[in-house]
Image (cartoon, rainbow, N blue to C red):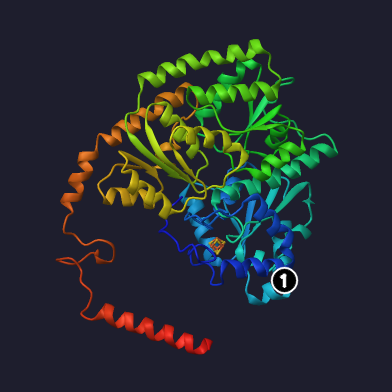
């Protein structure tokens, strides 16, 4: 979610207020405390881009949410109370309806190692096989920087799996990628279990059914639509990653191949590959995108040419729907869901002009086909996009509609331009196949048609204070006390001078 105000990316936590040390200081502390391997892995899996820390919320929310959405999985956090407060608040705001465990610490338990013992006690007390298949314990920033060794926890207690992960804000750039941290750790655990011997049969398992695992959190109707598209090739959609229960992990790994529809699940892809499963990128958006994606599915699943041609029958209805629902608008796209490039593709296929597509996520091989296609259609793709880049692109493009995060939408509306919140409005609709082809035009038309309303809103509020001159209880535009800014400027200059003197 991005309902939080924009944060200072230079702060270790991106400005959320959880920590005071710099990002590099925290990373160095983690390495010094024995977490070099963890930090190396995080840096390799989630490389920083031109912008170190996209302005979204605490990354650990991603992994927390994945755990909370799984049946019979307990989640415990270890971190500063303010971080845990924010994370639990947000998870309940999003309807978790589950308890989040918390192991608090103070300087003494952190320094003496008692925190690790407290975590172990909490895990042992929670690991009741009557209630749980697994317990997930997450180190937030401070315990990671202090080297709390979750890898020393028992791997299993009374048959309940114990999964320990480090999700520090100074190592995982976005909450989307934190979903992969937990999904990858669970897939690894499940893969090693499956390699060691028989495992539980996935729910709804059908003998001899060939499935395609889908990576990414999709709109609920989309896996059904994908299932219909690949059925002519003798395939069904397997369990989605992130999974909803532990045994689904076995089902996902048992698939013929995996489709990295959301292209940032690096750790999860590693596990699929370790299990010998090929992974394809992109997704079945529009007619061209669907054709190319079906081709990739056919290759990795060994479908015959006849099966492939049978699957292509879906392309005519998609083309017809795109033609019947044209999008006649210039649209900019930005977000941090992982589906931004696919949304931009669909818009362009529907007739829109999309000069810019920004994503907070990194460039990976699984979005490469989409990037190349978009570039060939005049769309600049910005990976690891910062809010400032998204805003600059929007201002330059002057779109009929801006799709983006809350601060971007807010800025667009201030300027009287139609804008839509990506997460709530775009991700809450089908994207793939015929359903996706029909879905986008209506929202674009509804919003661009309201442009005049936005202009009226701007003129209605004309003369009202904005930014630091806004507020309740004023009869006019709030004014600074006389001389206030000048005094503050002089104070800052004096402070800077004093610090300079100390430095010399
Ligand atoms: S865990 Fe780290 S990134 Fe998350 S709120 Fe706390 S300090 Fe910020």
Q: Nearer the viewer, residue 319 or 130?
A: 319
Q: Residue placed at 57% from the left, 66% from the top?
A: 23
- The answer to whether 242 appears left or right of 475 in the picture is right
Q: Position of residue 389 (x, y in %)?
A: 42, 52
Ligand 1 falls in which quarter? bottom right
Where is 257 relative to 480, above or below? above
Residue under pointer 1: 114
Q: Nearer the viewer, residue 476 or 369?
A: 369
Q: Position of residue 17 (x, y in %)?
A: 49, 67
Whole-percent x, y for residue 153 in the image: 77, 58
At which x and y percent is residue 427? 45, 37
Residue at point 43%, 83% (across, down): 496
Residue at image position (25%, 34%) is 449
Q: Is residue 448 above or below residue 39?
A: above
Q: Is residue 131 visible?
A: no
Badge 1 crowding class, 10 Å Cα cut-off, few under 14, some 14 to 19, many 20 or more, is some
At 54% from the left and 58% from the top, the residue drawn is: 52
Secondary structure beneath disc 1?
Answer: helix
Q: Quadrant of residue 369?
A: top right
Count every numbered label the image shows and give the total. Answer: 1
**On screen, residue 235 above or below 129:** above
Question: Where is 462 relative to 382, above or below?
Answer: below
> Is there any visible trace of residue 157 in the rendered image?
yes
Rendered image quadrant of residue 79:
bottom right
Report whether 144 appears left or right of 293. right
């Amino acid at each position: 979610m991005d309902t939080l105000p924009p944060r200072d990316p230079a702060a270790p936590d991106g400005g959320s207020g959880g920590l005071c040390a710099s990002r590099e200081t925290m990373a160095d502390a983690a390495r010094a405390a024995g977490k070099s391997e963890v930090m190396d892995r995080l840096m390799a899996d989630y490389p920083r881009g031109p912008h170190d820390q996209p302005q979204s919320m605490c990354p650990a929310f991603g992994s927390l949410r994945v755990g909370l959405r799984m049946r019979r999985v307990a989640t415990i956090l270890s971190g500063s109370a303010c971080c845990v407060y924010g994370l639990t608040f947000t998870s309940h705001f999003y309807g978790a309806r589950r308890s989040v465990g918390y192991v608090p610490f103070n300087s003494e338990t952190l320094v003496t190692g008692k925190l690790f013992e407290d975590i172990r006690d909490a895990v042992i007390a929670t690991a009741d096989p009557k209630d749980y298949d697994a317990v997930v314990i997450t180190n937030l920033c401070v315990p990671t920087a202090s080297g709390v060794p979750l890898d020393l926890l028992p791997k299993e207690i009374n048959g309940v799996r114990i999964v320990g992960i480090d999700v520090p804000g100074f190592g995982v750039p976005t909450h989307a990628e934190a979903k992969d941290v937990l999904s990858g750790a669970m897939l690894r655990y499940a893969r090693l279990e499956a390699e060691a011997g028989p495992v539980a049969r996935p729910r709804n398992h059908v003998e001899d059914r060939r499935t395609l695992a889908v990576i990414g959190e999709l709109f609920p109707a989309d896996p059904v639509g994908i299932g219909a598209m690949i059925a002519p090739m003798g395939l069904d959609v397997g369990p989605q990653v992130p999974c909803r229960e532990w045994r689904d992990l076995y089902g996902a790994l048992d698939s013929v191949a995996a489709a990295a529809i959301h292209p940032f699940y690096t750790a999860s892809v590693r596990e699929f590959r370790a299990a010998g499963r090929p992974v394809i990128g992109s997704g079945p958006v529009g007619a061209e995108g669907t054709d190319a994606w079906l081709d990739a599915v056919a290759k990795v699943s060994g479908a015959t040419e006849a099966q492939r041609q049978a699957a292509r029958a879906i392309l005519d209805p998609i083309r017809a729907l795109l033609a019947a629902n044209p999008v006649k608008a210039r649209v900019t796209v930005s977000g941090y869901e992982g589906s931004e490039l696919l949304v931009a593709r669909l818009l362009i296929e529907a007739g829109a002009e999309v000069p810019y597509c920004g994503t907070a996520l990194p460039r990976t091989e699984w979005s490469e086909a989409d990037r190349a296609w978009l570039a060939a259609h005049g769309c600049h793709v910005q990976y690891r996009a910062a809010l400032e880049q998204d805003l600059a692109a929007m201002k330059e493009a002057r779109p009929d509609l801006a799709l983006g995060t809350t601060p971007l939408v807010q800025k667009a509306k201030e300027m009287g331009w139609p804008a839509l919140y990506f997460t709530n409005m775009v991700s809450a609709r089908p994207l793939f196949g015929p359903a996706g082809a029909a879905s986008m035009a209506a929202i674009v038309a509804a919003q661009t048609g309201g442009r005049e309303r936005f202009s009226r809103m701007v003129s209605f509020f004309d003369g009202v204070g904005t930014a630091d001159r806004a507020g309740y209880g004023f009869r006019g535009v709030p004014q600074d006390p006389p001389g206030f800014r000048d005094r503050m400027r002089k104070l800052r200059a004096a402070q800077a001078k004093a610090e300079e003197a100390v430095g010399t």
